[in-house]
Image (tube, grey):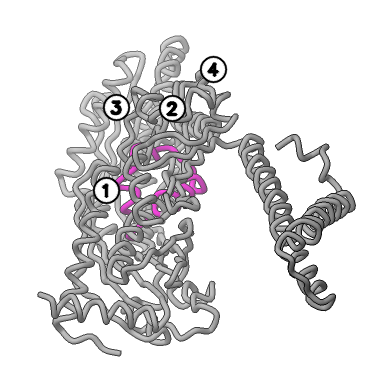
Amino acid sequence: MELDELERDALRELANVGLSRAATQLSELLNDHIEMTVPLVQVVPYDQVTQALQLDPHAMVAAVWQSFSGQSEGTSILMFPSEDSKNLVRALVGPSMLGAGEDDLRGIEHEAMMEIGNIIITSGMAVIADMLGQEVRMSLPGYMEGNLPDIMAQRSWDNAGREMQAIIMFTHLKAAQREIEGRMVMLMSVDSVQVLFDRLHKLLRSL
Amino acid sequence: MKRWKSGLFNTPLRIVIAVGVVVFSVEFLFMTLLHDVIMPLMSFTVSDRIWSIIDAVTLVVLVSPVLYFLVFIRMQRDFAELTQLFADLTDTLMVGVLLVDTDLRVHRWNQWLERKTGISSQQACGKLLTELFADLNSPRLLSAIELCIKHKSPQLISQTLNRYVLPIPLVSPMHDLKLMQQQVSVAPLTNSRGETLAAISINDVTESVAKSSALARLAMKMESQSNRDQLTGAYNRHFLWSWLTPQLKQSVRHSQALSCLMLDIDYFKRINDTYGHDVGDAVLRGFAEILHEQMRDSDILVRYGGEEFVVLLTHADAAVALEIANRILDRVRKTAIAPLEAGDVRCSIGVSSWTPEEPCSAEELLKEADRCLYHAKHNGRDQVVIDRESSHSLR
């Protein structure tokens, strides 16, 4: 199951539209000009996800995830390098964190990252749900931290042994004079991805 | 619904009896009608075999709607009970629960909210959220409700990024907080007609916010009140002034001299840049240790700035001070501060003295030592410079 260049471009454009909506929401929430772009979208089989993410397997990653159900089931995971996400949160909510202890700080970072991730994942998944023409129900977000293998192993993201595919959106976030490279991974069944591709074909042919 | 609880149908046995009575009376009437009225009227006869088939069919036809009706009633009662139970359940929760639609119209308002806002469920239901809170100013809440209903994705609204979600005044303001601090989640709920409502749950986190800000204030206060520099264990500037002023008064009273050494590590920035901050910190600690070794118990060591230290020597005139300063200079040259070798770390020292004959203020004493330190730096570092008046007294 492969996408040709035109289709990949189309999917990337849709993702860009979706995440720019998230950026607008975040700008409002964080009182800062925030830009989000998706320079690359990839679709790979589940067992190739870790490789395709192009992240240092030893580096710490902060991940926010929301699982989804409905006609399509799976999980969306948003990942940022831990250090970057910490610095971002510190830059954005800095003044209110003055004098907070190390534990408080961690709590504040988790909470803030969870909300930011929640908004980004919602917008990203809205694009996918629109493409699928299906209603997708999302769970409440969760947060975890670890290196990439840990994160992929910590929970069985694969859905009851069904064959899974991953849509990977490489995200580029600009905020508080910083640039952060993140990854949004949507794990879903091969069938769902097939439906998505069919719709994409149709969409492109209708143009 | 109460009617059913104590009425005719509250036990299975009674239901069976009732069904039986109804079925047989209806069938009896029907059969009598058919046999005695309709058939003679139509002068029509059938065999017994046909009669028994008619009997069975009639029974089924009559019984099934009755059974269906009974099951329906039963289900409706269970459902109503369940609905009431869930409504009661939301009232038992220690969180605020409300349901709103896309227009922000309130569909449910639990007891917790009634208590905290003073708005009753009756007043709230059917009203718009914006009508209930004229000062509602949380774009995030509005967009979260929209995202939640439109994309069926629950939204977290954290206290960290959002100060107030629903403006609920506190009955008793805590510290500087006048409005309830909240942690809110918005989740989609779809009803049988396919309409999606947003279920908003509100956690009151005012107490923990107040606690942590109180702790933060306390930590900052303690930090500013502490006398010591954490890295070197030397006293800080804050302590220097609180110590020097009364000490000078005592010197006046007892006519005792007091001297000040101002020391600066030569090329400290270069050490930091070359070896990194960890080595820089080790050098600072090692340097402070050397100074401590050369001091008496009544003297104090102060970290004055980044790599700048002040040593205040009690009962020490310029001659004693100069001797100690030279000893320090020598020790610093000869001591290896890991990972640097002996001689890698050098320092410059300015010396000033207060004597009963040449009194000055605390500020002047430090300024003079600073001026001497500047000269020592200017003359090529790694040396001691003493102020002119003190040097006169040496002769």
Foreground tag (4 vs 3):
4
- Residue range of the region highlighted in magenta in the rendering: A84-113
Confirm or deny contact between disc 2 and disc 1 (CB under 8 A): no
Residue position for label 3: B366
Residue position for label 4: B172
- Dot 3, crowdedness within 10 Å: few (<14), some or many (≥20)? many
Foreground tag (3 vs 2):
2
Question: Could you confirm whether marks 4 and 2 are on the same chain?
Answer: yes
Question: Could you confirm whether marks 3 and 2 are on the same chain?
Answer: yes
Foreground tag (4 vs 2):
4
Q: Which one is nearer the viewer's eye here, A183 or B94?
A: B94
Question: Could you confirm whether marks 1 and 3 are on the same chain?
Answer: no
Confirm or deny contact between disc 4 and disc 2 (CB under 8 A): no
Chain letter, disc 4 residue: B
Left or right: B49, with A169 as reference point: right
Q: Quadrant of the N terminus of chain B?
A: top right
Q: CA distance from mark 3 to mark 2?
A: 14 Å
Confirm or deny contact between disc 1 and disc 3 (CB under 8 A): no
Dot 1: element: helix
Give the numbered dot on residue B239.
2
Foreground tag (4 vs 1):
1
Q: x%, y% of residue A190? A: 39, 84
Q: CA distance from mark 4 to mark 3?
A: 51 Å
